[in-house]
Image (cartoon, rainbow, N blue to C red):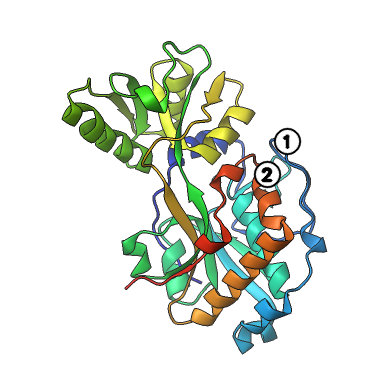
């Protein structure tokens, strides 16, 4: 199993959303899922049939062991986290459970730190890693990926914040951000390239060391915040602080995330991709995204590729 350090679009919201969540070192998969946040219906993982063609692509030792060992970071709603009952769930969790069903394997999910996820796949400790890992050139030098979802940034703000900020009028407005996060880097670059360079008022950006302070600033109407849209949707739906997530996405903010696997075992990537495409065909992939109201982050089947880097 392998680990890699990764930046995330919604990192600044994470700790606030998961403050009441007790994390476990490991999460064992269940085969039944109840309806969660949003209007999506339950996803019956246990009803998914084995795809024999996908299973045939697995290395012999994995078919013999009957397990798929997965590295993740279990503190990032709505992708991988524990709900109020302590159950491990999320978009990534259900998706990898569904992939395991297609491959006829029992899925074991381990909660690791961000800095160890990619290395744990490199060294063979885990078969795959899933934690909204953006497929950057740096990561592609370490591991391969099966791409499965796209990420875009949006704006979260207080419902009474005035004037309202949209992706079309970010220049001249006030933003907040958390040090060391992808959205903060994007905001700074956007202000330089789209505002200052085009003789528009620059964005005022207040930076905080902690995510809790960033969210508190949004709740107190000190500014607005760029975040991964899926994370923003979750926070807005579960927050009592009057936060709302805009439906529009920020131009130029699209990235693609993948399921990491070792360069030493390309057959694992082949099997995972085949299982993923099978989930697209039977509608399970779409249902998982519908559950968290983020169907706009779906990739087309033609975009689900094995990315191997150079």
Is residue 75 positioned above or below 72 on the image? above
Residue at the spot x=79%, y=69% of the render?
A: 49
The one nearer the camera, 32 or 48, is: 48
Other residues around mark 2 within 10 Å, as few (<14) / some (14–19) / many (≥20): many
Q: Secondary structure at mark 2?
A: helix
- How far apart marks 1 and 2 lie (CA) works out to 8 Å
Inspect this view and state whether residue 5 appears: yes
Q: Residue 255's x, y, as percent?
A: 42, 50
Instruction: For the C terminus, give its image quadrant.
Output: bottom left
Looking at this rendering, what residue extends furthest in the bottom direction?
60
In this picture, residue 221 sits left or right of residue 107: left
Is residue 192 positioned above or below 299 on the image? above
Q: Residue 180's x, y, as percent?
A: 32, 42
Q: Residue 52's x, y, as percent?
A: 73, 79
Total marks drawn? Answer: 2
In this picture, residue 72 sits left or right of residue 101: left
Going from N to C along the chain, the mark reached first, 1 or 2, is: 1
Is residue 66 positioned above or below 128 on the image? below
The reply to whether discs 1 and 2 touch (Cβ–Cβ < 8 Å) is yes
In this picture, residue 275 sits left or right of residue 195: right
Q: Quadrant of residue 152?
A: top left
Q: Residue 124's x, y, as percent?
A: 48, 77
The circle drawn on residue 101 is none
Q: Quadrant of residue 195?
A: top left
The one nearer the camera, 70 or 145, is: 145
The circle drawn on residue 39 is 1
The one nearer the camera, 196 or 69, is: 196
Is residue 203 positioned above or below 256 on the image? above
Residue at the spot x=66%, y=60% of the render?
A: 280
């Amino acid at each position: 199993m392998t680990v890699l350090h990764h930046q995330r679009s919604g990192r600044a919201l994470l700790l606030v959303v998961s403050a009441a969540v007790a994390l476990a070192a490991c999460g064992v998969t269940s085969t039944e899922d109840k309806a969660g946040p949003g209007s999506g219906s339950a996803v019956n993982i246990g009803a998914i049939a084995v795809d024999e063609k996908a299973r045939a692509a697995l290395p012999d030792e994995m078919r013999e062991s009957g397990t798929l060992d997965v590295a993740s970071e279990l503190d990032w709603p709505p992708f991988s986290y524990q709900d109020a009952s302590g159950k491990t769930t999320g978009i990534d969790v259900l998706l990898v459970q569904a992939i395991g069903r297609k491959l006829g394997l029992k899925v074991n999910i381990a909660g690791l730190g961000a800095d160890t996820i990619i290395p744990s796949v490199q060294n063979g400790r885990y078969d795959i890693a899933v934690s909204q890992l953006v497929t950057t050139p740096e990561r592609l030098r370490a591991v391969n990926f099966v791409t499965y979802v796209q990420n875009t940034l949006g704006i979260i703000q207080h419902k009474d914040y005035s004037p309202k900020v949209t992706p079309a009028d970010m220049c001249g407005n006030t933003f907040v951000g958390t040090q060391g996060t992808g959205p903060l880097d994007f905001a700074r670059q956007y202000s330089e390239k789209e505002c200052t360079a085009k003789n528009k008022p620059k964005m005022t950006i207040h930076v905080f060391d902690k995510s809790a302070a960033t969210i508190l600033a949004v709740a107190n109407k000190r500014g607005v915040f760029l975040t991964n849209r899926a994370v923003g949707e979750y926070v807005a739906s579960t927050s009592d602080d009057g936060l709302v997530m805009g439906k529009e996405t920020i131009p130029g903010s699209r990235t693609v995330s993948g399921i990491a696997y070792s360069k030493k075992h390309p057959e694992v990537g082949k099997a995972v991709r085949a299982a993923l495409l099978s989930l697209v065909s039977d509608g399970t992939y779409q249902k998982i995204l519908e559950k968290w109201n983020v169907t706009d982050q779906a990739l087309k089947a033609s975009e689900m590729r094995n990315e191997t880097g150079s």
